[in-house]
Image (tube, rainbow, N blue to C red):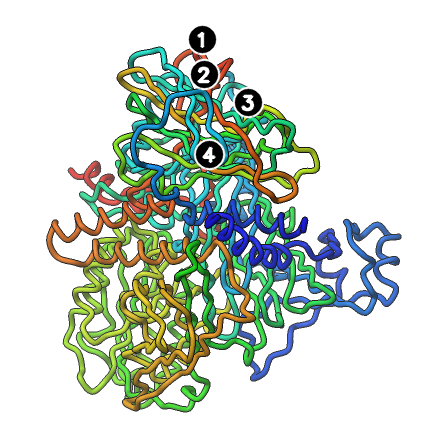
Amino acid sequence: MRMWTRAVGLGVALLGIAAAVGLQACQTVGLKATGPTSAQAAASGSRDGKVPWARTHSLIEYPSDWPAHALKRGELRQERGPAFAATEELWVIQKAVEPATPAEDVPGSGALVTKQPGSDGKETQVPVPLKHTDVRASITGYIATVNVKQQFHNPFSTKIEAVYVFPLPENAAVNEFLMTVGERTIRGIIREKEEAKKIYEEARSQGFVASLLTQERPNIFTQSVANIEPGKAIDIDIKYYHTLSYHDGGFDFVFPMVLGPRFNPPGFADGIGAAGRGDGGSSGQKTEVQYLKPGERSGHDIALEVEIDAGVSIEKILSKSHTVAVLRDSEDSSKARVKLAAEDSIPNRDFVLRYAVAGDRIKSALLTQADAAGRGGYFTLMIVPPADMKSLERSPMEVVFVVDRSGSMSGRPMEQARAAIERGLNRLQPGDSFQVIDFAETASTLGPRPVEATPAGIRQGLAYSAQLNSGGGTMMLTGMKAALDFPHDPRRLRVVSFLTDGYIGNEAEILRAMYERLGAARVFSFGVGSATNRYLLAEMARLGRGAVAYVGLDEEAGDIMDLFFDRISHPAMTDLRVDWGGARVSEVYPARTPDLFVGRPVLLAGRYEGPWGGTIRVKGLAAGVEREIEIAADAEGQAVAKGVLPAVWARMKIADLCDRELLEAGPRAAEEAQGAIKRVALEYGLMSAYTSFVAVDSMTRTAGEFGVSVVQPVEVPAGVRYETAVGGTAATGGRQKEDNRP
Amino acid sequence: MVRLWVAMLVGLAVALGAREVSPRAGQEAGALPAGGEASASGDGHAAERRGTQEGARFEAIDIFVDSGVAALAAYQVEAKATAGDVRLVGVEGGEHAAFAPAPHYDPAVLHAGRMRERIVIAAFSTAGELPTGRTRVARLHVRVTGEQADYAVRLETAGGADGKRIQAKVDWAAAAGGAGDRK
C-alpha cells in the first residue's frame, strides 16, 4: 500500500513534467543554408552600443506569404505541425558571416582539417569505430536532461574493441547506461571502478559483447566496447542531468564535443595524453586521445537537438559556436526547440547555446522533490543577487592578468587573450594596480612588481601584451605561483584573471597549489578557445571564490572582459548564511556557500525533513553592510523537476567530497573522502572517479580472440594547431624533451 | 482513471529509479520458503533452480511473471542469489514488446552491502497490447564464480491495465539459447 501511495504521488507530478516537455505540437521548419546574400541580415539591437553576444546574430525576414512562397520554391521543408502563421517569427541564428579562422591558413584548425587536402591533394577518410553521435537534450528551468547515443560499428574485417575518450559537462550526473546489441537493449550496472573493469576484461577475454564507461576526470570519460564483429553495430546510450549556469541575463547550455590536447609536465604519469592517430602510446600517459592528422577525416558526425522550457519568457536564443535552427512555440514564449544544422555536424568544438530570459523574471526560488516516504526529500535553491548591488562601488584592485602562451594557444586563441587583456587594462581605474604574467614552459612578468594604473602604466601594459606570442608547453604551475606568490598589497583587493584554454593534464596539482596560495585573492578564469577544459576553469573559479567566463573563437573577447569588469566593479555579497525558515535542512552543497556576484546567482542543493513553510532568508555582507534576501519557501505552483533532484544533489555532494579529497591534508582524509564518494555514487547509481558502468551481453559470445583495440581518433579542436598542440613538445612535454637530450 | 493509472505507473518507475523503492519490512528475514512460485501478495515463496558449472563464467537468467488471464501492465520483482558468487552485469527487457525496454533497477538495493547479490527491478507499460499468461519480463546477465549459482525471486507487486493490483506468479529459469550454447 505504501508503495502504491508513493507511486501515485510521484506519478501525478511526473505527468505534469511529461506534458511540459516535448508534448507541444510545434512546427519544425528546416532551412537550407543559402548563404548570407539570400537573407536580409541585420545586426541585433543593443542597449548601450555594446553587443555582448549578438555579433553574429542574423535576423531573417520572410515575405508575408511565407511559408507557402518558400515551400513552392523548395527552399523550406515543412516537417510537421500546424501551419506556421506568416505573422510568427522564426529566428535562425547563423554563425559569423566571416568565419573567425586564424589569419594564416594553418592546418590543425578543426574547420580546415575537413578542407585541407593531404600531401597527395586528397582528403583521407579514416575508418573509425564511432560512426555517429546523437544528442537529445531537454531543459526544464535550469536543469537539463541529456541523452547521448554513440553508434559504434566495425568497418574492419576482424573483430575489434572500440575505445573512445570524450568529454561531458564537468557537473554532469551520469546515471544511465544502456547497450543495444541488435534488437536487444541491456541496461548497464554501476559498480566500483576496479570491479567493473575486471568484469569487463573477463567478458572481453571470453568473447562476450561488453561495454565499460569510466571516468578519467569529471569532464573526461572513456567508453570501451568489446568484441564488435565485422559489419556489426552496437549503440551506447548515456543519460545525465546537469544544472545550467545563469549569468548576465541568460542561461548557457553547453555540450562539449571534443577534448583539447593536454600538456602533461615532465615526470607526470597520471595525465591525459595527446598523440597523433596511429601513434598510440607515444604520450606516455595511461589515458590518451589520438588526433586526426591534417588532411584526415573520420566521418564521425554529430546531431543535436535541444528542447527548452525555460519557465519564463525567452527573449533571445543564440549559438555562436554552431549554425542552428530555432523554432519558437507560437503560443508559449517560454518554450523553444533548437536543432544543430546538418552542415555543421563535425564534432570539433563545444556546442554553446545561450538564451536570454526576461531579466526581471528570474528570481530566487526553491525547487523540491519529496521522497517516497513523504517525510522529506531533496531541494535546490537558486539565490539571485539583489538588483541594487549594482549601485555599490568597489575598492581599489590589484589585477593580475595571467596569460597562457603555450603552443595550443597559437593563432586565434592568443589573439583573443591579447584582446581581453587590452580591454581589461583600459577598464582599470585610478587607484588600481596591475601585473601581467605570461607562461608557457617558463613564466615571465611585465615587471618586478605591480604597475600603477596610470596612463603611462597602462601604455606599458598594452605594449607588453601586444608582443606576447605562443609556443611551448603549458607549465601552468609556474604561472600560478608567479601570480599568487608575490607580496599582496593590503590596500587593494587582488583579482587574478587566468586566460587559458586549460589544456593540461595535472589539474589536481594546479588546483591544490592555487588553493594553498590563495589568501585573500580571488581567481577569475577565462576559458579561451573552442573546446576548453571547463572542469579546470570552473574549479579554479569555484575554489578561488571568483567566477568563470568563456571566450569562444567567434566572440568578442573585449566584451567578455567588459562583463567581467562590470561584475567585479561591484562588491560581492560574502559570508552568506541561510536561515531556512523552520525547515529541517541537512547536507547542503556546496558546503561552503559561494559569494554572490552581480549577475551570477548561486545554486545550493540539500536534503530536508518535514514541511517547508515561512520564508528563507539569505544574509551576507556587501561592502561591509549586512544585506538580506528573502525567498518564499512555497512548494505550490513550482515547476518541480521530478526524478532529477536526487541525482543533482548527489552529484553536488560528490563534487564537495572531491574537494575534500583534493585539499585536505593527509592520506587518511583522502581515503575517507574516496570511500564516501564511492558510497554516494553507488547508492545513487552515478558515475564518479571510483565507480563505472559495465554491461555484458552474456547471450552474445563471439568466436576467436577478442580482437584489436581501435582507438577512436578525434578532430583537433577548431582553432588549435596540430603541429604545436599534438606534435612536438607541446603535448608530450618532458617525455620528448628527455628523448632529445644530448 | 486511465490517466491516473498512467501517472501511477510512471511514478512507480521513477520512484524505483530515484531510490524510493525499498523492500517492505520483514522481507529480509530468514530464508524464502521452498516451492515453485511467489504470489503478488508478498508472502509467497520462490522457485529455485540449480546452476550447473564451476569457474568464472557469464550467464543469464530469465524472470517470468504469470498473470493468468489478466493483462500485465506493471511489475516489481526482487531477485537474489542464494548460492555462488554472483555479480549482476546487465539487465535486459522481456520477450513481449510491452516489456522489451530494459527495466530499471534500484542501485541502493544492489549496493546495500549484503553478502549476496540482491536486486529489485521494475517496469511498467502503457502499450495498447499487454501480455497475459506466463511471459518473460526480464533477463538478468550475471557473472558467476566459484560454486554453482542459485537464485530466488519474489514478486513484490503486479498491476493490470486498469491500475489495480493483480494476482500473479513469478519464477525464473536459466536463459535458453545463451552463450553456453554457442562457441
**Which mark sits nearer the N-terminus, 3 or 2?**
3
Which residue type carries mark 4? Val
Which of A14/A629 is in front?
Answer: A14
Contact between marks 2 and 4 (CB within 8 A): the answer is: no
What residue is shown with label 3?
A232
> Quick one: label 2, few (<14), some, or many (20+) residues within 10 Å?
many
**Residue A179 pos. (x, y %):** 49, 32
Disc 1: host chain: B
Q: In which image quadrant can residue A600 be found?
A: bottom left
Residue A658 versus residue A251 in the image, above or below = above
Is label 1 on the same chain as label 3?
Answer: no
> Quick one: label 4, few (<14), some, or many (20+) residues within 10 Å?
many
What residue is shown with label 4?
B77
Task: Give the alpha-carbon distance from disc 1 to disc 2, as whole Å.
Answer: 7 Å
Contact between marks 3 and 4 (CB within 8 A): the answer is: no
Residue A103 is at least partly visible in this image:
no
**Which mark sits nearer the N-terminus, 1 or 4?**
4
Is label 1 on the same chain as label 4?
Answer: yes
**Residue A528 pos. (x, y %):** 41, 61
Which of A178/A423 is in front?
Answer: A178
Task: Give the alpha-carbon distance from disc 1 to disc 4, as whole Å.
Answer: 32 Å
Quadrant that contains the C terminus of chain A: top left
Between disc 2 and disc 4, the foreground one is 4
Residue B64 versus residue A143 in the image, above or below = above
Is label 3 on the same chain as label 2?
Answer: yes
Which residue type carries mark 2? Arg
**Residue A25 pos. (x, y %):** 73, 56
Task: Give the alpha-carbon distance from disc 1 to disc 3, as whole Å.
Answer: 18 Å
What residue is shown with label 1?
B183
Q: Which mark is residue A701?
A: 2
